[in-house]
Image: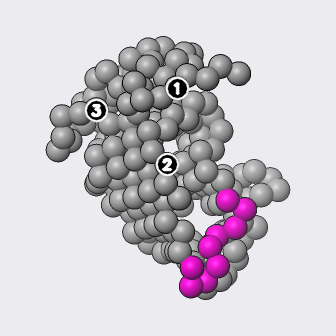
């Protein structure tokens, strides 16, 4: 799956899967210039109770902006009746040139019936969090705006190897009103 120059506004999850890849299969997500603004989790996934039943998920996020609705919103939201972290080893993520605000919450477990959420220890995951730059940034316009140009970054205080801003190139997006 490839997502390029995409803007996601609002609190819903960007990607939701009702199951993990089957054992022996891999799901590869390539995210290029994705901007999540005031968003829910990047990925919500229903996971099996036995990690051996799962394939791997690889996420390559390049020049993305992760701005979540609040400090309790994780990058990954795992749903299962049984709280077990073994399947976290099935996730691999890199974030070259991507940015997030301080306090980035990597993963939470959520019980599907009660909705109760618990932070997950992520040392088992192959997530190159240092490749996601953590710092402050400012959008071009107000949070309430639906104009894509207002969701381009105008300022960022995150070390990067390239001079162009992370996130969407609003000049290449079409504005569609609903």
Percent across and percent down for residue 27 are 54, 68
Q: Is residue 164 above or below residue 161?
A: above
Q: CA distance from mark 3 to mark 2?
A: 18 Å
Q: CA distance from mark 3 to mark 1?
A: 19 Å
> Marks 3 and 2: which is nearer the front?
2
Tell me which secondary structure the magenta stretch mostly adopts.
loop
Q: Is residue 176 above or below residue 62?
A: above
Residue depicted at x 44% and y 39%: 5
Q: In the rendered image, which residue does mark 1 sit on?
A: 174
Q: Secondary structure at mark 2?
A: strand
Q: Secondary structure at mark 1?
A: loop
Residue depicted at x 49% and y 59%: 29
Query: How many neighbours does mark 3 have within 10 angstroms: few (below 14), some (14-19), or many (20 or more)?
Result: many
Q: In the rendered image, which residue does mark 2 sit on?
A: 3
Q: In the rendered image, which residue does mark 3 sit on?
A: 165
Q: Quadrant of residue 39?
A: top right
Q: Quadrant of residue 167?
A: top left
Percent across and percent down for residue 45 are 65, 60
Q: Secondary structure at mark 3?
A: loop
| 115 vs 32, nearest the viewer | 32
Magenta stretch: residue 20 in it? yes
Percent across and percent down for residue 118 are 62, 55
Magenta region: 17-25
Q: Earlier in the sequence, mark 3 or mark 1?
A: 3
> Marks 1 and 2: which is nearer the front?
1
On the question of residue 70 being in view, the answer is: no
Is mark 3 in CB contact (under 8 Å) with mark 1? no
| 43 vs 152, nearest the viewer | 152
Is mark 3 in CB contact (under 8 Å) with mark 2? no
Percent across and percent down for residue 37 are 50, 31
Magenta stretch: residue 43 in it? no
């Amino acid at each position: 799956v490839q997502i390029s120059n995409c803007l996601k506004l609002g609190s819903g999850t960007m990607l939701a899967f009702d199951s993990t890849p089957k054992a022996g299969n891999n799901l590869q997500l390539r995210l290029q210039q994705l901007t999540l603004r005031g968003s829910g989790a990047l990925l919500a996934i229903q996971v099996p109770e036995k990690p051996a039943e799962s394939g791997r998920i690889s996420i390559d996020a390049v020049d993305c902006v992760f701005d979540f609705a609040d400090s309790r919103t994780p990058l990954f939201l795992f749903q299962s009746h049984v709280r077990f972290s073994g399947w976290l080893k099935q996730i691999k993520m890199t974030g070259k040139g991507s940015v997030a605000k301080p306090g980035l919450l990597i993963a939470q477990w959520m019980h599907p019936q009660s909705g109760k959420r618990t932070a997950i220890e992520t040392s088992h995951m192959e997530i190159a969090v240092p490749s996601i730059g953590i710092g402050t940034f400012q959008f071009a316009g107000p949070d309430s705006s639906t104009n894509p140009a207002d969701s381009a970054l105008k300022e960022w205080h995150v070390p990067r190897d390239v001079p162009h801003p992370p996130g969407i190139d609003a000049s290449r997006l079409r504005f569609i009103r609903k």
